[in-house]
Image: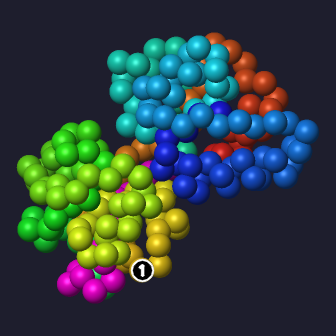
Amino acid sequence: MAAFATADAALVPQAIAAFQQRHPAVSVSLREGFTPELLELLGAGDADVAVVSYPDTRHLDGFELRKVCDDFMYVAFPHDHRLAGQRQVRLTELRDEEWIAGSSQPEDTLISSCLRTGFRPHIGFVARDWMAKQGFVAAGIGITLVPSLAADAVRRDVKLALVHPDDIPPRQVYSAITSGLTPSPATQAFLDILHR
């Protein structure tokens, strides 16, 4: 199977663990990448199923998608941040914050979901790894976005607040298989578990 990194924080490992418990004789392997790469793997026959997000309709010919869940966005704060105790925040409350992102270009990161509202974050530090981003946040250097799919894997010294869905709508997460092919019994069993 193939999946994007955030799905590998909890969703995919839980599905693989449940699948392996029910089907111990079936071997599962995982490839990680961005949605276009995952669809390429699927199209080339190098994966039987992919977990994708933000599907680009230009690349969907030949694939059958089924929605798995919505992935909401949280902001990660240091434990002593002025907003750390809030359950939900608005982007307007974050305009003066220093951000930790995976790229200096917000268009290439999760922060791109903020841009449609006109919000332009100030990216102070670039860290591609999830644990590194959390380390910067815990040290009080900045804040970062955390998808709900990864919320359970966040460090204990980091506090999360949901970004109001009007500011950042949830991204949709899908399973993808190749159109026109009947999934193998193992693939169908995995899909059933993933969607449960």
Kindly identify which residue carries mark 1.
157
Q: In the image, residue 80 lies at what x, y percent?
A: 28, 86
Q: Report the predominant secondary structure element of the magenta stretch.
A: strand
Instruction: Please say if 49 is above or below 125.
Output: above
Quadrant of the image occupied by residue 2: top right
User: Does residue 181 appear left or right of residue 113 in this picture?
Assistant: right
Q: In the image, residue 6 lies at what x, y percent?
A: 48, 50
Instruction: Please say if 29 is above or below 119.
Output: above
Residue 112 in view of the camera: no
Residue 49 falls within the magenta-colored stretch: no
Between residue 82 and residue 192, name the one nearer to us.
Answer: 82
Residue 119 in view of the camera: yes
Q: Amino acid at mark 1?
A: Asp
User: Does residue 71 appear left or right of residue 93 in this picture?
Assistant: right
Quadrant of the image occupied by residue 187: top right
User: Residue drawn 47% across and 73% down?
Assistant: 155
Q: Quadrant of the N terminus?
A: top right
Query: What residue range appears in magenta?
Result: 69-83
User: Residue drawn 86% across and 49% down?
Assistant: 22
Q: Secondary structure at mark 1?
A: loop
Instruction: Please say if 180 is above or below 106.
Output: above
